[in-house]
Amino acid sequence: MREEFGHNIRFQFDDTSQHSLRTEGGKERGAEDKDSPAGLEGRDGYDSLSDSERSHPNLVASTLLDGMTSRVETRAKPESVEVRAAPPGGSEALYSAAWLKSKCQECIRRGMAGMTWQDLSSAIFELLSSTGNNTAIQNDLAELLGFSQLELIQDLLTHRQEVVEAALLNATQLAQTASFKKNKSTSSQRPAFGSQVVIQSEQERLLRKHMRKEEKRQARKEREGAGLLEDHTSHLKALGFDPEAMRRERELALEEAVSRPVLSGARQQRAVDPSLLYPHVYDSLAKARLSSAFVAGSKVGLPEEAERYSDRIMEELRIPHTTGALPPLGEGFVQIKELDDVAQLAFKGTRSLNRIQSTAFDAAYFTNENLLVSAPTGAGKTNIAMLCVLREIKSNMVGRVIQRDQFKIIYVAPMKALAAEMVRNFGTRLAPLGVVVRELTGDMQLTKSEIHQTQMIVTTPEKWDVVTRKATGDVQLAQIVRLLIIDEVHLLHEDRGSVIESLVARTLRQVESSQTMIRIVGLSATLPNYLDVAAFLHVNPYQGLFFFDGRFRPVPLSQSFVGVKATNYLQQMRDMEEICYEKVLQNVCRDHQVMVFVHARNATVRTAQALRDLAASNGDLPHFQPQQTPQLGNAEKQVSKSRNKQLRDLFLDGFSIHHAGMLRQDRNLVERLFSERLIKVLVCTATLAWGVNLPAHAVIIKGTQVYNAKKGSFVDLGILDVLQIFGRAGRPQFDSYGEGTIITSHDKLSHYLSLLTRQQPIESQLISSLTDNLNAEISLGTVTNIEEAVQWLSYTYLFVRMRLNPLIYGIPHHYKETDPQLEQYRRQLIVAAANALDKARMIRFVEHTGALNSTDLGRTASHFYIKYSSIETFNELLKEYMNEGEVLAMVAKSEEFEQVKVREDELPELDELLAETCRLPVKGGTENAYGKVNILMQTFVSRGSVDSFSLTSDLAYVAQNTGRIMRGLFEITLHQGWPAMAARMLTLCKCMDHRQWAFEHPLRQFGRLPSELVGKLEARKTTLDRLKDMSADEIGHMIHSVRMGSTVKKILHSFPALSLAATIQPITRTVLRVRLLVTPEFDWDDRLHGNHSEPWWVWVEDAENSYMYHSEYFLLQRKQVLSGDPQELIFTIPIFEPLPPQYFVRVISDRWLGAESVVALSFQHLILPELHPPHTQLLDLHPLPLSALKNPRYERLYSFPYFNPVQTQVFHTLYHSDSSVLLGAPTGSGKTVAAELAIFRVFNQYPGGKCVYIAPLKALVRERIKDWRIRFQKMLGKKVVELTGDSTPDTRAIQRADVIVTTPEKWDGISRSWQTRGYVQALRLLVIDEIHLLGDERGPVLEVIVSRTNFIAAHSQHPVRVVGLSTALANASDLALWLGIKQGGLFNFHPAVRPVQLEVHIHGFPGKHYCPRMATMNKPAYAAIRTHSPDKPVLLFVSSRRQTRLTAFDLVAYVAAEDNPKQWLHMPETELDSLLVGIHDQNLRFSLAFGIGLHHAGLQDGDRKAVEECFVNQKIQVLIATSTLAWGVNFPAHLVVVKGTEYYDGKLQRYVDYPITDVLQMMGRAGRPQYDDRGVAVILVHDIKKHFYKKFLYEPFPVESNLLQVLADHLNAEIVAGTVASKQDAMDYVTWTYFIRRLVLNPSYYQLEEASPSAISSFLTGVVGKALAELQMSSCIEIEEDERTLQSLTPGCIASYYYLHHTTLRLFQARLRPHCSLEDLLLLLSVSTVVLLAFLVYQTVVSSHRMPRSTQSFP
């Protein structure tokens, strides 16, 4: 070896971008220097270069180091780099060859013109492997890469050793694994035309010259002596290289240059045989595809052993079965007995796995790797799927118990028939494990409970696409999917392939967004481009890719492809039959059975008879006839019993037929006789290949034209069917090989040949349906803008293929060059699709921001699988008023039916159908396609029958799609608010479901009565109401069947019917509240109605204006019908002046024709409330300084220098007068300070007086106590006492207190005995916070407190000042008058008057079910945070503890996908770690790590305080809390998100709306005074309530009284206290309440029809009388004989003292006995709303017979 070998070589780039070589010493040698550069002489490969080649630096570098992946230069060991064997797995180190490649590519992209990444990597490797030190190399690298790449240079020098070793190891591995074939025959050379001209590329010429030089050099070395050669060879081997492999590498480079296009200057990567790179790829055709032939005028690749034959009739190509030994696959077969118990149960009856299953066993059963298993049909892929299923089951086992509700497994089968077979297979095998398998297809629907009970669901691609599109319906199901198995994934190539693309892309994005593992397993027949499909499924090709070619079939397959050359159709059919007969005869003569597959039911009989006739005419019939045996005699007897004439005739000659139209028993008989070899030739349809595993030695496909109803024409037989049919060829254990023959037309021969020999790559079909799929993703919420849509497209198979084969997708070649990831082209596709959707009103596309928002129309199209083109048609044709005929004509023009064509042979039958079955006019007649569709729709509803095969297929297709489209149109009309059209569409939907017209009798749809009997009912035009009025005997006589009279009567009782009662309450002059009471009036029959519920639609329509003001879907539960309990629906609707006569509430069954109820909302006696006075104007005053208090002690309590504008305006009234005050102002306006001003007034003027502060929640009380004990008690020396259910101090403490902070219920209980409690009489100030809660459920308590306070003040010498604090009110003047407040004390500011202005966004979300709707709000909530408050505090309110957890998990998933997942965490990691140590709640500990806190009542105090402290100090940015936090703790934030405005009411057992005040309170937390100039509130609501919140979040809400509902309990308390002693006292008591004031002003709200004094007096008398009667029934009071005097009784005293409802005492008296068991007592307590103490006291009092008259007798 030469000394110069260690010199440092580098490239230098000068201004002219010319390359020169520089030695380490600095001497420059340019292109003009003819001597070789120092250090290159003697190098391996350099001497072989010519002078001109040596002057080309790129060629020199490429020769020395071909990209470090294909060539390795042999060198002496440099001094500065120690070359040693790399450790195992070194190739996967961080600084690997792949890392260097990526860095070089990045440098090239950043502008290093004139070089490829291979050139750059060669230069870098040359520098790093030289003997120079790091300092010298650093300068050279800086020269090469530029100073902008200093970080890369530092990495290269720091990890110099690792980079060199990794590159050497990478090259060694390639050299050792490559297998090269020398082929110097003329076939591998380029053709020479004549003797003078040879076509060569420049690269080829240089490489050939290089090879010649190399050979000469090698020969010279051999002549010089074997010793030197041995030294050189041993040195290479010591470095880990194979000299011979390196030589072959150069030869392969020459071969590649030969095959490369001459005129292509682009540098291409060399294709490498995948079976050499990936451990589980067994592809014998990879090299065979290189040989080619012209078949039927097309060039296709052929295996070497292929045989061809051609004559004037046909061309045949035969590929014989493989006979060689299979390649070794591992150590052996996996024995089932060696597996664990779980696997043994599932594989019971199986001894071992086969070769393919054993190869994939480890990856399937012991890893969670995504898999792609591509193997021939019948190779046992289903068992590999079973191994993956068992892996998932085992991973969800705790101990030996399967956690069945923690996972779902989805198996996507291509056909419904296959889905049913898979359910039987998996269901039987998994039953011992207790795993439930069910089918979910268009034919088999599952209820919510069935889905919950099922662990494995077998479905079709379209059905699973629909399920996962509906985020509002089955989101919980999709979220717990852990394994997705896609069978026959090669469907990607067919029209349905886009569905699979959509499914996989959605699943992959879900994995990333939710950070949960969903394993994807793809099963397929042998694929041509399996690597692309593996990339699409995110399969690791080294671990999860399993490819087995045709050699691995259980029975080797010989394939014959026959192309018939005749072009005349009839001649072609005759030739096909003759060829088919010859093939059949050949096999039958060898004693083989044959299955002939045709593509129509009638073609089975025609073909079988033609084959038999040919056999008879040729004298070959004896070959076909079965041998005479006793078994044949029995079979003849069974066949003779069949009603199928053709079956009987054909069997005696050895032929038979099989198709889906035959009776089940006939099909079973044929299958059995064929398996017993009594039938030689079976002519059948493809359903036999899919449904029953019935193999034969030979299968023949006769013809490849199949009628496709969807396209309305004949199409080519799909590759999926061909593979399935060929899979039936060869009987395992009987045949050594099978034969598959396909007979087609000559022009289709190359098509099927290339498909079956894997010549054509599978391409994507997504572009054709991109618009619909994009709409689905936008509707789902996974795509919200253009960027996300472009990213979504990168998860599709389209993205994989259009990068590899751009031209076929219409992408110009230069796009790929300038944009390798095709991002701009993807953006163009998305923008075009978005514009189309926006034009169709399916989405809202804001082009300048890129935002994509779904609309009701788009969501409907997505949920009902309606195409974009159909929506365009409906936009044009759908009108508010259309009759049924016009609707059907419009539906017939849908895009879904575009392919339906009219054929000449169908016209007579269509004319007949038009005359006999069509009840509605048909536009277009029989000549037009849409007329044909209309006729078929009406034929389906009329239950007509068709004879033509094509019409039968079209009828099934039309019926399958019409119902879905009708349902979509119903939803569209519902959203449009068209009541008449919605009712008509719903009726048509039910007509399609029941195949019955609306004018036919409703009892027909039950299917329990004979059609003749129903016909008699229709003839007499008897309505349901008339039938219900008749007795069973009368009905029997009417229909002339007395026996059936009782049956008809029973069905009548089961017919769904409802009784409706509606009341209206005007809230304002423009809004009505409707209370609808729905009572079932039918008998529940499980066979008719199911086991769960009946669905209904309810809407309110204005008949005059034909508009629908409200609509909703509700379920009538089975238990409600059985118990007869009514269901109450409450909703609001608008009202306009002048008042219309009436609205109608219509309730219609979603399932049953004729099941409808209507009730009128009459406005004849409706009295609208008066217009409310304007708000108090906020005056432009100078802010008052704190010095206005004139008390330094008070001034020190505040940290701010000035009062805000609201406080400034009310200051004088509160601080300098004793007037009662009502202050209405938005949350956050500083109303607490206003209350403190009034308290200071008491401290100043009435030192001994007491102040009572009533807060609606205990949490608010605690907050006030915590604050005032510091500021009032410590700083002012005033005693502050808490008085709640949790804290009740003794009487002396209360008497000494200056300020009492309490809840309404507690103060009500105490003040009831005000005559005996001095501290109540000492009351000087009553502050009621949130007094607008008068209109809430707890409002009557506040009403009673104020009434009692006014009563006390009227009967004592000390007036009590009342200060009411509330949000802005609509009817503040009414409330002020009731409180006794004069005009000067009323301050009711507008909702917009806030210290920090509030920006409100309201978003509506569709969906009938609460939980899925909440899940769809998570991403918009996250988007709101990113948009409105990316770095400021955020409060997110939810309804329950569970929702805090679920919301936090989703937010974590979204933020984890960002570049900075900890962007919401604002504390050091060390502080976080110490914080998390003290957190007990696991969910909180998890979310805190991402800066998200949880806050709910279920947290321990320590956890809750830690979260509060972190949020207040802005260490975490997001706090997810239940709604109680809005009242409890004053945590202002920049952004407030209210996620849902409903909560679950346990008493009503359903979801109800928050009071509007709660929503306002939550919104009020938005905006931080002194920090923000504005706050933002985002309200996410159910879409049907969006308009209600729009109105009342911006306008104040009027406060009404709720006293009537609990008047009896409060009257009882006053009677016990002695305040009310007679009926007149009770009437007087009511006049003190707020109720009486509102009754006068808004009488219709309280169901009072007129507001005259006499009517009001009569109404009050009735109300009080009813309340007293209820108390008397509960034994709480006694009415004396004079019918006036009222006396309290013991139960009344107990109810008053323990704050119980009087009905609870009634329950005690009815059920309590002296000797009740513990079980009886617990049952009694569970059905009452009581506490145990009250129950014990009552028992004690009753047993001692003490009858105290008032609560003073109680301790």
Image (tube, rainbow, N blue to C red):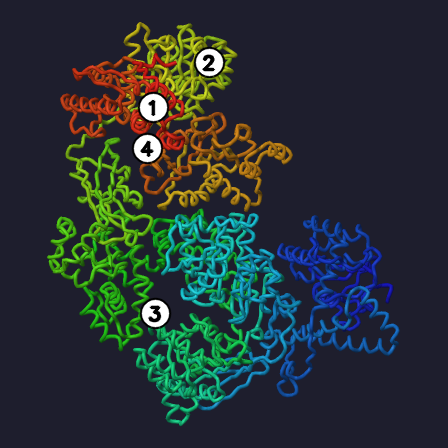
Q: Residue furthest front?
A: 1715
Residue receiving disc 1: 1700
Say few, some or many: other residues with alpha carbon within 10 Å of mark 1 (under 14 / 14 to 19 / 20 or more).
Answer: many
Asked which quadrant contains residue 595, the reply is: bottom left
- Check residue 573 in the rendering and tell me which mark sits there, or answer none: none
Q: Which of the marked residues, 3 or 2, is nearer the chain's N terminus? A: 3
Q: Position of residue 946 (x, y in %)?
A: 26, 72
* Any part of residue 818 in sight: no
In space, the residues marked 1 and 3 are separated at their CA atoms by: 70 Å
Q: Position of residue 88 (x, y in %)?
A: 73, 58
Q: Which of the marked residues, 2 or 1, is nearer the chain's N terminus? A: 2
Question: Do the residues bearing badges 4 and 2 touch, measured as CB atoms within 8 Å?
Answer: no
The reply, left or right, for residue 1258 in relation to residue 322 is left
Query: Of discs 1 and 3, which sits in the foreground?
Result: 1
Residue receiving disc 2: 1280
Say few, some or many: other residues with alpha carbon within 10 Å of mark 2 (under 14 / 14 to 19 / 20 or more).
Answer: many
Residue receiving disc 4: 1592
Q: Quadrant of the N terminus?
A: bottom right
The reply, left or right, for residue 1122 in relation to residue 1016 is right
The three-letter code of the residue at mark 1 reads Leu
The reply, left or right, for residue 62 in relation to residue 1431 is right
- How many numbered discs, if any? 4
Residue receiving disc 3: 709
Question: In terms of secondary structure, where does tag 1 sit?
Answer: loop
In space, the residues marked 1 and 4 are separated at their CA atoms by: 34 Å
Say few, some or many: other residues with alpha carbon within 10 Å of mark 3 (under 14 / 14 to 19 / 20 or more).
Answer: many
Of the pair 1341 and 164, the residue shown nearer to us: 1341
